[in-house]
Amino acid sequence: MIDFEAVSVELGDTSVLEDVSLRIPEGTFVALVGPNGAGKTTLLRTCNGLVSPATGAVRVDGRHVMSASPREIGRLVATVPQETAAVFDFDVSAFVAMGRTPHRSRFETADDADRTAVESALERTDTARFADRSVTELSGGERQRVVFARALAQETPVLLLDEPTASLDINHQRRTLALARELVAAGKTVVAAIHDLDLAARFCDRIALLSGGTVLADGPPDAVLTADRIESAFGVRTAVGTNPATGSLSVTPLSGEHAGEHRVHVVGHGTGAARTIGRLAELGVRVSAGVVPAGDVAAVTAEAVAREVVTAPPFEPVSDDRFAAAADLVRRADAVVVAGTLGAPNRRLADVPERTFALRDAPDGHSSRPLATERELLDVLGRSAPAEPTAR
Amino acid sequence: MVLRRTVAWSGALCGLLFAVVVVSAALGYAAIGPLEVAYVLLNEVRVPAIGAGSLVWFRPFGFDVATTTELIVTRIRLPRIVLGAIVGFALALAGAVMQGFFRNPMADPSIIGVSSGAAVGAVAFIVLPVSVPFGRATFAFVGALVAAFAVYAIATEGGQTPVATLLLAGVALQTFLGAAISFLLLNAGDSLETAVYWLMGHLHNSTWGRVRVALPVVLALFVVLLAYARDLNVLLLGEDDAHTLGIDVERTKRILLATSSIVTAAAVSVAGVIGFVGLIVPHMMRLVVGPDHRILLPTSALAGAVFLVATDTVARSGPTEVPVGIVTAALGAPFFLYLLRQREVHSL
């Protein structure tokens, strides 16, 4: 439906897009993700003719965007921009009716098709309630939904969304993207620039990861969103896991500060352990964990943020090879932290007195050095850092 | 819906305009009753009909009115009233277009230098020893269009005319032309008074000739602007949004600018620089009918006609006649400030 053929764009003297080639088939929901300034908005703007490529071509439904008339493009592509000016005092239904502009000739008045399109657009975006209010009186999020309604009323095969969820509450974020999903199911092609990687992974068929004006990767969410790719695009370490509620990818950014290459093994399970695993990862430590019962909250967290995790089926004795795997992690760790609930096998694992620390809320009864916060551990490790003197 | 509201409002304003015209024609040195004026006006109504194998103009009414009364109304008062209506119509129309175009409530018809250009043309004609029939109006008209085109050309780069650049170029050129006018006035000598009087804007010396020149221009371009009213609505959303809604933005801007500049030039060249009509009338109508230009343009134009006929009546009713430009500003500014304080006027 949309073909980008070696598109390069220059704005002023800076090159914004370089040789981008991308093919978006009909009936797909594609998310453009990438850091600020990656060129997502510019790429969208080449599809509706607002930006003309220096070289290369963009075709929508086989038509060359730059040589088609604005009206022709207006019947093919609808856009929900990041921001819409609000210096006018139109009421919502008049505003949404402007979406019909490319379908009407100069002196035609609204016909039934126009009215139906406007009504259904208001209905579907949950904005019919304030159809008679002035656009200037709406909140930012309400206005964004009204702009979405206008784009729906345009009834185009292609819909471009630039940060459609940026100022929406969580309910309307989900509804907006679910609506986009419905439209895709009905045959529309939707391209959205989205910052929220979790939402992108959850709702989109494909993700194109942009960085520095080029496409780093393009494909299904779980193929594109790997921790390494995200780090090279965004420059931030992330924990890529699975959201237990939706089953889709979940990306959690971790701290930008690098605590060096300290390896810390967390022993224990339950919420206490999960919290410690998360905080240590946030502090930039390479965390490993185990043995944790599979499905435990600590296991879920560890799978998202830790490099190495040893899990074992719950309610069963830990098998010898699982225990050995965990013991190996303990051996390689610079420190062992005891947190959360401790079972018998973990008690044995934590029995490395010189390197074992226990958080204040950890269970008593073993010989370990107390620790007030996870950050304190960094200080201890930093002072005695054996392997990485240059760390921090 | 929109069409019905447009017709209703326009009909009401046409009625009001007729009433104001009748009252205005009744006022003056010679006392004439409003009823008599109405008779004269009705007597002037002509209906085309086929008679004796050819087209003839048939007068359906034949009220008995004194010849002097008829002469005073049709030869002296009506030309001025009709010209005032046309000028008010044109200025308010162009003002509404410019405010929408610039998405700026401060915009008025002369914002891109039209009035200043016209003033330079007219003052140059008055001051310089040249003599051509209709010379002053022609000079003013040409000056207006040259100024508007200059501003447009300065602000255009690579086929794009950013509105903010246009605005700044307009302000800068107006300042420059202001200097030119001052210089011309310094060297005006005996014609200084005529020049200053022209600059204040007045409808003195109105003739049917001027009406015949201004009316077709204004009416034809009014139709063009009406055709672009919907595009102007969409332009209010911003140029990017307008483009994605299928509007050829640069072309539409060119047409709107050219059309409203010519409309303004036509008004200014026959009546001088009459301020405030183009600024406040569109604001007042926006309060009443809303921001939709399909209604706003015709109603603003008609309200402008009513406003200028009424203020000109005031201007010529005092012990000594004052230029109507003084009256529009003196009545308009306080009213506008009142609206501003009431927070009625705050946006487009």
Image (cartoon, helix red, strand yellow):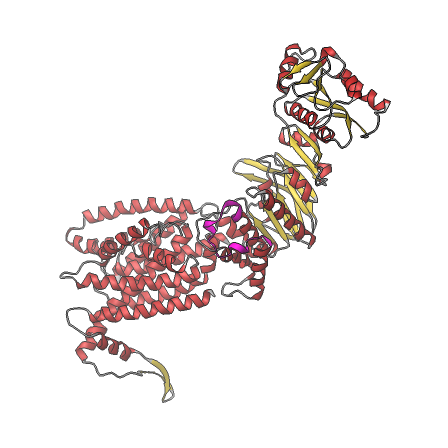
From this view, report whether residue A375 is shown above or below residue A185. Answer: above
Which residue reaches farthest bottom? Answer: B52
Is residue B3 toward the left or the right of residue A127 in the image? Answer: left
Which residue lies at the image location 63% right of the left edge and 21% below the top edge? Answer: A258
Which residue reaches farthest right? Answer: A320
Is residue B291 toward the left or the right of residue A362 in the image? Answer: left
Which residue lies at the image location 58% right of the left edge and 37% below the top edge? Answer: A16
Is-magenta flag for residue A136? yes
Is residue B167 toward the left or the right of residue A241 in the image? Answer: left
User: Which percent across, then down, holds residue A327?
Assistant: 80, 18
User: Which percent across, then down, holds residue B142?
Assistant: 32, 56
- Report the front residue among B222 and A292: A292
Q: Quadrant of residue B13?
A: bottom left
Q: Determine if residue A44 is in view.
A: yes
Q: Determine if residue B246 is in view.
A: no
Residues rendered magenta in the picture: A124-143
From this view, report whether residue B226 is shown above or below residue B170. Answer: below
Q: Quadrant of residue A359?
A: top right
Which residue reaches farthest left? Answer: B319
Which residue lies at the image location 14% right of the left edge and 60% below the top edge? Answer: B320
- Report the front residue among B218 and A279: A279
